[in-house]
Amino acid sequence: MLVAHLAGQVLHLVERRRLSRTYRVLDSIVTTTGAGIATRTDLMAYDGRGLAAVSNCRTPSVSLYRVGRSSLSFFKEIHSADPLPGYMHGVEFSPDGEQICLINSGGTCRIRVHDVATGDERYTFEIPGWGPKDASYVDAGHLIVSLSDGSPTQERGAPYSSRVALVRLDVENERHEILDVADIPGAHVDAIFHFRGQVAVADQTNGLVRMYRVEGGRVTADRTIGGFAFPHGVCLDRRRLAVTCYGDSSVCVLPRTADEFDPESTQELSRRQPQSLPGASADRATANS
């Protein structure tokens, strides 16, 4: 499991041992730009082939890292074609790993598709009235995007509204089409992740992870999972759902089919001594967001 720490400016590679349910940090690397300057990160993506990407927040770029069996190393930086794109919030690889989406939240509020090999921008688009937070490929021609109509501030104001949009994407012909949306009033969303027709979305202001289904060009609400402290990043695999939380700097791991999060134990991640999670059905490993 890869875990990025925004304020700590570090990326961790974490091992989970299935039988003993233990966790330990195998390697850590300071998150940097191509110039070697430490940078804060927001969301991340993994291409399934040994390459991870992390959005560089206020730097208009994403950084790519090689992921070995027990090591991390900096690979390169991909810059936005716009010198002042706004907050670099999300990042996502295409299914074949040849393209990468750079998602600007604020500023230009655009989703930018770049070539991984060359770094060149292939296509860019916006969804008027909405700031994209993150995106996840459903397949080679479709994206599921999390959107919000505002950014967090310290000022009191009207409640946020958010939306999940299914987008048909044709990079070669420079076209896109919104197929369906699911509105989320009174919420500010963050990361989104698709896996085999199921979608997880972090609802920060309500402490929830919202689950959706994508099928036949439609997005339908499935269920909500509560118990998170300002959830930020989300990830799914065949068995588990992982959630990083800003509220308590935790990584929460629970069964994919769960309908609530109630940790039975809390363990700190360690480089030296793996921590066991004795028989818990859900667990929270304190690390970072």
Image: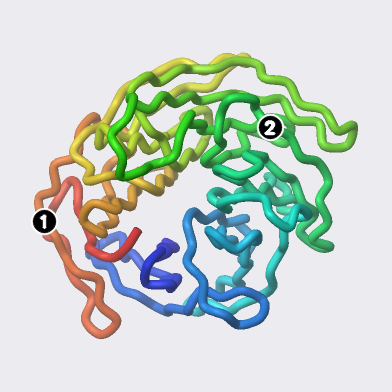
Q: Quadrant of residue 274?
A: bottom left
Q: Nearer the viewer, mark 2 or mark 1?
A: 2
Q: In which quadrant of the rendered image does the C terminus lie? A: bottom left
Residue type pointed to by label 1: Ser
Q: Where is residue 140 shown, x and y percent of the image?
A: 72, 36
Towards the viewer: 77 or 128: 128
Question: Is residue 261 toward the left or the right of residue 264 in the image?
Answer: right
Label annotation for residue 126: 2
Residue ranking furthest to the bottom: 272
Mark 1 residue element: loop
Question: Is residue 233 toward the left or the right of residue 94 in the image?
Answer: left
Mark 2 residue element: strand
Tell me the residue that label 1 is attached to: 265
Q: In which quadrant of the rendered image does the N terminus lie? A: bottom left
Q: Residue at x 37, y 47 (%)?
A: 232
Q: Residue at x 43, y 43 (%)?
A: 236
Q: Quadrant of residue 239?
A: top left
Q: Quadrant of residue 276?
A: bottom left
Residue type pointed to by label 2: Glu
Q: Residue at x 61, y 74 (%)?
A: 33
Q: Mark 2 or mark 1, which has the lower sequence index?
A: 2
Q: Is the residue marked by circle 1 packed among few (<14), some (14-19), or many (20+) residues within 10 Å? A: some
Q: Where is residue 196 shown, x and y percent of the image?
A: 53, 33
Towards the viewer: 94 or 156: 156
Q: CA distance from mark 2 to mark 1?
A: 43 Å
The figure's colour scheme reads rainbow
